[in-house]
Image (cartoon, helix red, strand yellow):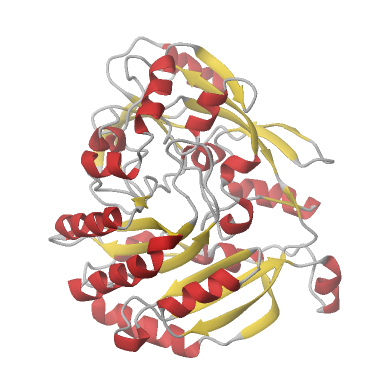
Amino acid sequence: MIADHPATLSGWGLFNPAQCRLAGPRSLLELTDWLNAPRNGHVIARGLGRSYGDAAVNENHAVADLSALTRVISFDAQTGVLHAEAGLSLLQIIREYLPRGWFPPVTPGTQYVTLGGCVAADVHGKNHHADGSFFAFVDELELWTPARGVLRCSRASEPGLFRASFGGMGLTGVILTVKLRLRRVESAWILGGARRLRDIHHAMDVLDADASPYSVAWIDCQAAGKSAGRSVLLTGQHASAEACRAARKDVFESPAREPVGIPFTGPSWLLNKFTVTLFNTAYYSLQRETENGLQHFAPFFYPLDGVRDWNRLYGKRGFLQYQTVFPGETARAAMPGLIDRLAHSGRASFLAVLKRFGPGNDSPLSFPFAGYTLALDIPAAPGVEDFFRELDDWTLRHGGRVYLAKDSLLPPQSFRAMYPRVEEFQDIRRLVDPRGMLSSSLSRRVGLG
């Protein structure tokens, strides 16, 4: 049987690393043997470590690294249904199946995330307003649970456990396999455009009216006055093969080179209010407005994947992401207020992204619901905990909630107020894990342990 070993782990934000015990199974059999062995302490699964906070960290306890479990069990070339182990990444799926005309139906802002991670965080993408979250495209899960062993669950079999696993952050069971319906596409290209918007209100107006399958707005959170929240809106749809050939593009062109790496850890002052303001001003001013232009899928969906280890630019202290969603009826007041609090805090957000959400689903801890979501990357610095409490209070006051996959600091009382169905989730957990073996630094921090 495999053995675990000491390891220092953190989320992608590199904030608050912790000592854990890490195991790296090479097969599902190795994994289940290790999970079934008598043990003291808690266990959580981990994929490629792209959760920003401590969702896949387990201080002083065990972590199962599933990134080697990438076997494809089956693929139906007629329906696009992919059945694979939970460690298979979106990058591996795209490399193998995009040349055959298939693409992930929902994708977050990075390819470096596993199928298991997509389920556990119930990831959303630029198309949530049109298609919903990852939950909408998964037909079946296979889970290892402490009390009931390996279970297959779906909308018809173990439906409560199935729903709770989306957004459940790995606490309903260790995800072993996933059946996912891929999307049929004609090319590796996106037909879309870019448009500059004068402020946050203009951005929400345009997002409301836009009918594009994919849309996202980059927000300049350092702009003040009448320009507060000025934005660049990016929209797109999958391009037809005919459009690609007309533009003399290779229909299923692959990226020509590996991403550029960051060979050093940046100084803590590198991304500050002054440098971020300079960058934002240049980006907004130089952005060329386009309509119906062809862009390769990689920079459209995954702009930050072009720089490997970009998180190191934030320095040794790392950074935190704050992603919140507000319902449509409060978002018009809540979003400007959130941006105003950031501007007056003296802190800078190098990346700020606004998206429109469609209706949520029936998963008790799934993050999205109809409204608007804003994600902020904020360097870790003295006083950041107090600042996040201020953002939490503002979010709660306007009926919003924070995304657990991005969270690093949310306290229990705020978590329970933001996720009113938490007891329903806990009831389902108790059926498969009555002793609370599945636990993480995140779950214990927010009171789910």
Residue 316 seen in the figure: no
Pick the front one: 240 or 416: 416
Point out the image quarter for the C terminus. Answer: top left
Where is 49 relative to 174, above or below? Answer: below
Image location (x, y in percent) of residue 383? 13, 60
Where is 351 relative to 325, above or below? Answer: below
Please give the name of the residue rendered at 56% of the width and 82% of the height, measured from the top-left corner: 195
Image location (x, y in percent) of residue 205? 51, 75
**Count the marks: how many?**
0
Image location (x, y in percent) of residue 45? 42, 31
Q: Residue furthest bottom?
A: 285
Where is 374 relative to 222, above or below? Answer: above
Q: Residue furthest front?
A: 329
Displayed quadrant of residue 251? bottom right
Please give the name of the residue rendered at 35% of the width and 50% of the height, measured from the top-left corner: 401
Image location (x, y in percent) of residue 41? 27, 19
Pick the front one: 64 or 193: 193
Please give the name of the residue rendered at 43% of the width and 22% of the height, measured from the top-left corner: 428
Pick the front one: 195 or 35: 195
Displayed quadrant of residue 176? top right
Residue 94 seen in the figure: yes
Point out the image quarter for the N terminus. Answer: top left
Horizontal side of residue 131 vs 403, given as left or right: right
